[in-house]
Amino acid sequence: MIQFRRSVQVFWLAVISLYFFSRPATAQQKQGLTDEMRALVETPAVPGYEQDLSAKIARLLAAHKPRVDNLGDVTVTVGSGAPHRIIAAPIDEPGFVVSGITDDGYLTLQRLPQGGNLPLFNELYSAEPVKIETPQHQWINGSVAGLSVHLLPQRQHPPSMADLDNMYVDVGATSAAEARAAGADVLSPLAIARTLYVMADGRLASPAIGDRFGAAVLLELLANIDAAKTKGTTTFAFVTQQWLGARGLQRVMEEQKPDELIYIGRLMRPVQFPGRQQAEATGFTHKPGTGPLIAEVEGKAENSGLVSDLKQLAAQNNITLQTDSSAPLLPRGGYMPQPKLPERTVHLAIATAWPSTPAEYIDSHDLIILVQLLSRYLQGSAVEIQPPAVTTLNEPALPPRPTSAPADAAILKHMIETYGVSSHEGNVTKAIAQLLPSWAKPQTDPAGNLILHWKGNGKGPGIAVVAHQDEIGYEVHSILPDGALELISKGGGVPAYFLGHPALVHSANGMHPGVMELPEGWEKADFQWPRGPRQTLRLDVGAQNPGEVAQLGIKAGDFVTIPKEYRNLLSPRASARSFDDRVGCSALIAATWALGPNLNGRDVTFIWSTREELGLEGAVAAAKDLAQQRRAPDYVFAVDTFVSSDSPIESKRFGDGILGKGFVVRAVDNSNVVPRNLEEKVVTLARNAKIPVQYGVTGGGNDGAAFLLYGTTDVALGWPLRYSHSPAEVIDLRDLQALGRIVAGIARSW
């Protein structure tokens, strides 16, 4: 045991040294509140696996000579003499560890904490991008598997994503050995990918922000108070494993035996035990922006002298300090002996909206007021802290015009990271035109379709190839009296993939962060997701009334998306939202470069269509226009997703296209049946050119169906896609390459 402890101490010294000596000296300078919070929340810290965050906190506090114990608790002590107080804040968050790896390379999970009361926690991870930490403290990308909405109508009893048995993580591996070679293994911690967003009125949104505001309070106190003015000895403790019985806090308490304890952390719901009579689950009492909270102790808020002292101090300084009894004081328990709490013990908190969900947010003013209250208590005077400035993000810039054919992945990355919900595809249209060769002069029709035509000599068949520009999302329908935005859907998806997550409002002056609200009753044990098209959808951007929304520059008609990023999985696989149908758009761009300006008199039209997700609207307009010009194509090759069941949670009976095995002939979907002889013709063309090809049956429709009315034959093409219409779709880049090659081959020789 002694040798083990020494090994742990050596490990921690190595970790801290790595952070101290590998970072520039300026990193230890005082940071603003936003930078501090970003450093805290953007580093995942699953209970028991907080090492990276502990090291980062120690680095931020290097001037104070922090101590890190073998649990990862970080402590800094200032002052001397009595009384001895501890001001403690937790740093861990609920998450997962890898529990196993399947033969085909998927990771299975166990949640930490294994119990607890965390409504919708598992479901809100489904089909989301995640990070997995390797033993070498590197982070690799993954995607949690999710049900594909296009395949759901074919199933009587789809698996529940609330059940851990149905949670798998896709890192792009095809075998257990490949996953392990990338660094994923049993006990690797895993957490949802996150970005800190600053909403209106100084509200800070990020997964786990309710688990980090206490640490931010401690950092601000250490950065701003004058240790010489404090009374007694104060130990600032950033404690670990709070979600696992408060083990870090108990360790520090047992070691230091303080006279006084100030605990700063989230209010936690009482644990619900299966099979026992439970009180009706309710939301927490207070909302962000109502000021600091002081937790009630066993129904008697006045039983601690420290509670009374802080209330009196708050009243003297016109600080609203509200009592809250909606959660137990100081979550503790587990297998460790319980150190006795000092008589002078208090639990301070601030309210969080949508607690322990990806949409969680706090009000920075609450945090600042709490810092000011504690600085008055410690040194007799308040400190000045500036609230975060509201963040307005810029739309992604147009890609530079290439002078030679760009790589498939480069085209796709630009396509993915350009936003364009149905009816709002303008930026996508510009990006496509920018990525085409200089000789290509596409035209935009009244429906917004981008059309590139190689004029024929009348001797061959007329060919059209169409891929849609739009992605699913939302549109602002109205501004509600409380400042929330009422949304309408633009395309369908599984609610759990979007509600309860961060979102972006795309306005004329940029992108404004917000969070998608969850339906009423979401925290109740018997909650069911609303069904049907007429759901009330609300987006919170931090505004309190329509006037504040107007000041942000948001108005009805703006569009809304879930944030997205092109992320590499194990090569050659990638994950992102809106591969449907930016892969198709990319294939047409790549084929244009391959074909060049001269097709020897063949009549070929490439169409990047609009509003496909709303019912093929752009394709309908294009097909009608071509028919009126007496140019209706003989064949249309609609290039869209082959929604694949190549996933551990889908039935292999339907949509069984395999990632990495080539493009797919969509022989049958909900909108079209490809004539058998033409399906065979495509397969033969591909095999002769050594292009990998598959064919099969899937769900959904395709743009080619809009041309059937005018005598055109629809030969639908696609590529296998996992987890369709989700934030964590997965593709294999080899299938994109095959798709671009077959489109070029058809244009040359069909």
Image (spheres, rainbow, N blue to C red):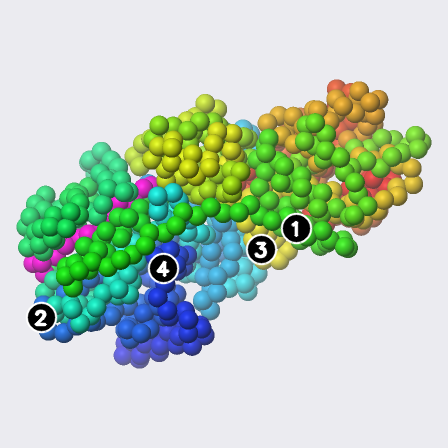
Residue 98 appears in the picture as rendered: yes
Q: Earlier in the sequence, mark 2 or mark 1?
A: 2
User: Which residue in the protein does label 3 denote?
Assistant: 568
For the N terminus, the quadrant is: bottom left
Assign a secondary structure to mark 3: strand
Q: Are marks 1 and 4 in contact (CB under 8 Å)?
A: no
User: Which residue in the protein does label 4 denote?
Assistant: 32
Q: Earlier in the sequence, mark 3 or mark 1?
A: 1
Q: Amino acid at mark 1?
A: Pro
Q: CA distance from mark 4 to mark 3?
A: 32 Å
Residue 459 locus on image (x, y percent) = 94, 31
- Residue 350 falls within the magenta-colored stretch: yes
Assign a secondary structure to mark 4: loop
- Residue 335 falls within the magenta-colored stretch: no
Q: CA distance from mark 4 to mark 2?
A: 32 Å
Q: Amino acid at mark 2?
A: Ala
Q: Amino acid at mark 3?
A: Asn
Residue 501 locus on image (x, y percent) = 42, 42
Count neighbours of disc 2 (C-alpha within 10 A) and say few if under 14, some if 14 to 19, many if 20 or more.
few
Assign a secondary structure to mark 1: loop
Q: Point out the frontmost of discs 3 and 2.
A: 2
User: Which residue in the protein does label 2 denote?
Assistant: 82
Residue 438 locus on image (x, y percent) = 79, 48
User: Which residue in the protein does label 1 denote?
Assistant: 399
Q: Point out the frontmost of discs 2 and 1.
A: 1
Q: CA distance from mark 3 to mark 2?
A: 55 Å
Residues drawn in magenta: 342-354
730 and 693: which is toward the camera: 730
Q: Earlier in the sequence, mark 3 or mark 2?
A: 2
Q: Point out the frontmost of discs 4 and 2.
A: 4
